[in-house]
Image (spheres, grey):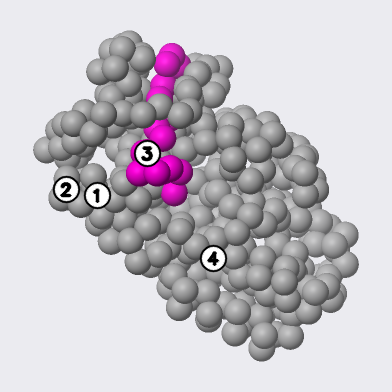
Amino acid sequence: MVRLILDTPSGGYPVLIGTDLGRELRTAISRLDPTGAAIVTDANVRPWAVKVAKTIKRAGLKTAILAVPAGERSKSLARLEDVLGFLERQQIDRGGVVIAVGGGTVGDLAGLAASIWQRGVRLVAVPTTLLAMVDSSVGGKTGVNGRRSKNAIGTFWQPSVVVSDLAMLETLPAPSYREAFAEVVKYAVAMDRGLFDLLERNAPRLVDRDLSLLERVVFRCVAAKALIVAKDERDRGPRAILNYGHTAGHALEAATGFRVSHGRAVAFGMRVAARMAASLDLCSKRLVESQDEMLESLGLPDRAPHADPDRVIAAIALDKKARRGKVSWVMPRRIGHAEIGHTVPGALVRRVVTRSLA
């Protein structure tokens, strides 16, 4: 097991990464000394939530489980109301804790509920997907989707502890497992050349779920994110680097009614961003090729998703970081280094997005 502390202006919290961390989870929750606990999960991973409930019961803490339907469509105001009603029925007071057991959808939904219930109760994140372990479970972003925009309704609410038990990945379906590497490649291309080299040397082992190697990869991703979040908790500046691949990626998700998975959308978004950067002479064509090769080797081939280019382009204009109608792009300059704040001509955006969807 490895452990790091994520420091933010609103407080620090531990992130535990390892295998079979039931005892560590029980200890971490006991240290919070909660007055009550409520577990939010989804239908696909409810067995893991049951296991978590049994684990913390040994610490003398009873809990109940709410399982929402699996999938991005549960990130809605209607499901948020369901979760809040559940917390009310369980009589979770300000000394209580919400435990999110699931992937990014559960983490975002439960985190938003925790942030507004009783004006804020503590959150424990138990991510069950690789994508959530390397990205969404840390950093404090919560939210649900608007009718046309991804994550349009949300808060910043840091968890009290994150426990990433890699054993949970052994039952994760192969497509869900592989798509998470889009976020891993994001960190490598935008921030960490050493991670890119690690992925390049070990792609087959990672695809085969080598847990010892995954521990190193998850740690490097979380450490990279921790450094950025410590500087910019509220996403006012440098934290935008974490949006590499997400401008076009989120637009693709929204334009398809969230039928395209987040990982696949981010892979698409990185390919779009890299091709635009090369067209603007911000990066080499070799970077575009290296990124493509890396995504391919990790199970994310360049297959165009079914989407209307006009809808995707319209959704890009609704990006949360757009100011006065201008979208700010994160552009790769070299492997391990990207820059924020780039404006891209509309004609180039249209051309690259249309070709990428052909």
Q: Which residue is mark 2?
A: 310
Query: In the rendering, which numbered label is found on residue 109?
Result: 4
Labels 1 and 4 touching (C-beta < 8 A): no
Q: Is residue 25 magenta?
A: no
Magenta stretch, residue numbers: 320-335
Query: In the rendering, which numbered label is found on residue 327?
Result: 3
Query: In the rendering, which numbered label is found on residue 314?
Result: 1
Name the residue at 53% across, 81% down: 82
Labels 1 and 3 touching (C-beta < 8 A): no
When the figure is inspected, residue 36 is found, relative to residue 125, above or below; the finding is below
Q: Earlier in the sequence, mark 1 or mark 3?
A: 1
Name the residue at 47% across, 74% down: 77
Give the foreground label among 4 and 2. 2
Give the foreground label among 1 and 4. 1
Tell me the element at label 2. helix
Give the foreground label among 3 and 4. 3
Q: Residue flagged by tag 2: what amino acid is it?
A: Asp
Q: Residue lying farthest bottom?
A: 89
